[in-house]
Image (cartoon, grey):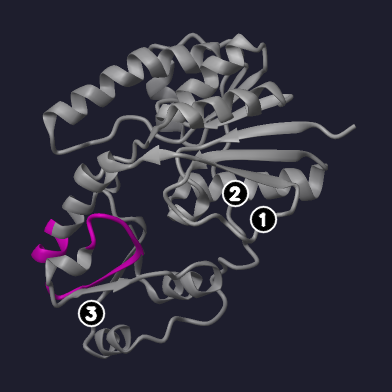
Amino acid sequence: MKRHLALVTHYFSTHRGGVEQVAAELASRLVDTHGWTVTWVASDVDTLPNRLPETVHLVPAQAWNGIERNIGVPWPVWSLGALRQLWIVIGQADVVHLHDALYFGNAFAWLFARLRSVPVIVTQHVGSVPYRSSFLRAAHALANRTLGRLVLSAAHQVVFISPAVRQEFERFCQFRAPPVYCPNGVDTAIFTPDGAIAYDPVIANARRAGMRVFLFAGRFVEKKGLNVLRELATAFPGDLWVFAGRGPLDPAQWALPNVLVVHGATGAELARYYRAADLLM
């Protein structure tokens, strides 16, 4: 008899965030390698992923994403209809897997699992976020110590991808089981030092001029330090700063001559930019 997992994230992997990419990879491996079936519930603000195994069933949750659009904080708010869908999905699962504790849909998934006596596993990716706004920093810290503490302390198992994040939550959480540290995996068949280097005329010209090449790969959001990187790119005009990703804080809008923005690079194409860089940020 196949085991069934309810996977809940704030967005699908087509949103291009690291958390969602990890969720997609884990779901695929559970299905292909371990024979599970998966129902993945996430906000309907993006197109649905189309490269997942057939036994990963996608449930787009109707959501309002105005908070991310307006201030860059990824916290979609789900509709009552989406929460009804989530209640049904949780009731059909053998186990629930949440990626991070604080997202709107994730918190309700934890609550519904508790009410329906379904075991919960939480992979916690994020700890404190150094927002420039003192209000956002304080609000996020309070949320971690209240809702985050409640969800993580009650989960059957918590997995941290970073020792620093684990140490932060260990200061105020009492876990049901010892938390596990499991770093994000790397596909070494793709991300290897040997292989093709991205041919980009901007990078080629920078190399000829003796410039160093710095690479950022990820979502263009404040919690990734984009504001700090903008200051650094301004302070070091003699280096080329390559930003691969997308998001509301698009470095292309900085109008800096030493900034190259690459949209849509993934997998082997992105690996070529890694090989072309002197430093990954």
Closest to the camera, between mark 2 and mark 3, is 2
Q: Residue at x 61, y 25 (%)?
A: 121
From the viewer's side, name the closer residue of 59 and 248.
59
Distance from disc 3 to disc 1, alpha carbons, whole Å, reads 40 Å
Q: Residue at x 42, y 69 (%)?
A: 264
The residue tagged 3 is: 211
- Amino acid at circle 2: Ala
Closest to the camera, between mark 3 and mark 1, is 1
Distance from disc 2 to disc 1, alpha carbons, whole Å, reads 8 Å
Q: Residue at x 28, y 50 (%)?
A: 221
The residue tagged 1 is: 52
- Amino acid at circle 1: Leu
Q: Residue at x 46, y 49 (%)?
A: 18
Distance from disc 2 to disc 3, alpha carbons, whole Å, reads 37 Å
Q: Which residues make up the magenta segment?
A: 231-250
- Asked whether residue 236 is in view, the answer is no
Location of residue 260 in the rendering, given as x and y in whole percent from the top left corner: 26, 74
The residue tagged 2 is: 24
- Amino acid at circle 3: Met
Q: Quadrant of the C terminus?
A: bottom left
Vertical comparison of 30 with 245: above or below: above
Question: Local crowd at mark 3 within 10 Å, few (<14), some, or many (≥20)?
Answer: some
Q: Quadrant of the N terminus?
A: top right
Q: Earlier in the sequence, mark 2 or mark 1?
A: 2
The local secondary structure at tag 2 comes to helix
The local secondary structure at tag 3 comes to loop
- Asked whether residue 219 is in view, the answer is yes
Question: Local crowd at mark 1 within 10 Å, few (<14), some, or many (≥20)?
Answer: some
Q: Is residue 244 magenta?
A: yes
